[in-house]
Amino acid sequence: MPSMPVLILFAHPALEKSRVNRHLVAAAREVDGVTVHDLYEAYPDFFVDVKHEQDLLTAHDVIVFHHPFYWYSTPPLLKQWEDLVLEHGWAYGSGGTALRGKTFLSVVTTGGRENAYVEGGYNRFTVRQLLAPIEQTARLCGMRVLPPFVVHGTHRMTSDEVAGHARDYAAVLTALHQGTLDPDRLQDLTRLNADLRSVLPPSAGTV
């Protein structure tokens, strides 16, 4: 199976304060076939280069939104990116087929633990339910959507736990690059990394 280049659109307005995301991004940068595109580094003034972003999307088969959960959604620059880059006639609508057939994944970190993100819990919904607008955006653009990779409880996470999540993230990215994940088989999962041993090939190297 031919390799599938992966584009990570990373959005964190205060990365220097986030040890978990720093480790996740560092792990991602070590994976062959993965491009990490730091939006806040590229566009501190929020002036997004639409043509450049569209060219990046065209050149990759797997698109990843990686961000902390801000008020049950994305940081503002990633929303700005969506509004500008996903143009009618290019990403969706009449003639908008540029993203059709690509694979989409959300990677999200939350301060709250997983038991806060359940029906009847503190936040009332799972992260996947709260990500429904983003998932539908990807589907509208013709992309195949994977369940999100969610890292819960970052505020009280031990160094060993951070390292474990970083290894899992690298394993998922490796499988995506190698084309060994089947989106259709995973649709019922609340989050992709709930039990990676059941969804990744043994060679992926999960912890």
Image (tube, helix red, strand yellow):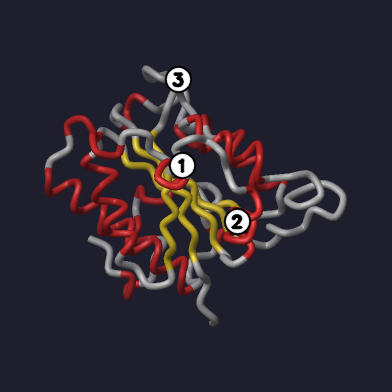
Q: Amino acid at mark 1?
A: Thr
Residue 55: horizontal and vertical position, in percent? 63, 61
Q: Is residue 122 above or below residue 170?
A: above
Q: Which mark is residue 139?
A: none
Q: Earlier in the sequence, mark 3 or mark 1?
A: 3
Q: Residues within 10 Å of mark 3 (few under 14, many from 20)?
A: some
Local secondary structure at mark 3: loop
Check disc 1 and report the residue beneath it: 190
- Quadrant in which residue 13 is drawn: top left
In the rendered image of this protein, does residue 162 appear above or below residue 204?
A: above
Residue 80 located left or right of residue 178: right
**Where is mark 3, residue-wise?**
124
Q: How far across and down, in percent of the image, does residue 196 sit? A: 35, 57
Residue at 54%, 61% (x, y): give it: 62
Q: Earlier in the sequence, mark 1 or mark 2?
A: 2
Which residue is drawn at the image coordinates 66% and 40% (left, top)?
Answer: 84
**Residue for badge 2:** 52
Q: Select label 1 or label 2 by which is in front.
A: 2
The outermost residue toward the left is 159
Q: Amino acid at mark 2?
A: His
From the top left corner, tell me how far across and down residue 154 is, in percent.
Answer: 24, 35
Distance between the alpha carbons at the discs numbered 1 and 2? 33 Å
Q: In front here: 88 or 201?
A: 88
Query: Is label 2 in a helix, a strand or a loop?
Result: helix
Tell which of 49 and 76 is nearer to you.
49
Q: Quadrant of the C terminus?
A: bottom left
Could you say which is closer to the camera, residue 8 or residue 146?
Answer: 8
The kind of residue tagged 3 is Arg
Residue at disc 1, secondary structure: loop
Gap in Å between the C-alphas at discs 3 and 1?
14 Å
Determine contact: label 3, label 2, CB under 8 Å: no
- Say whether residue 148 is visible: no
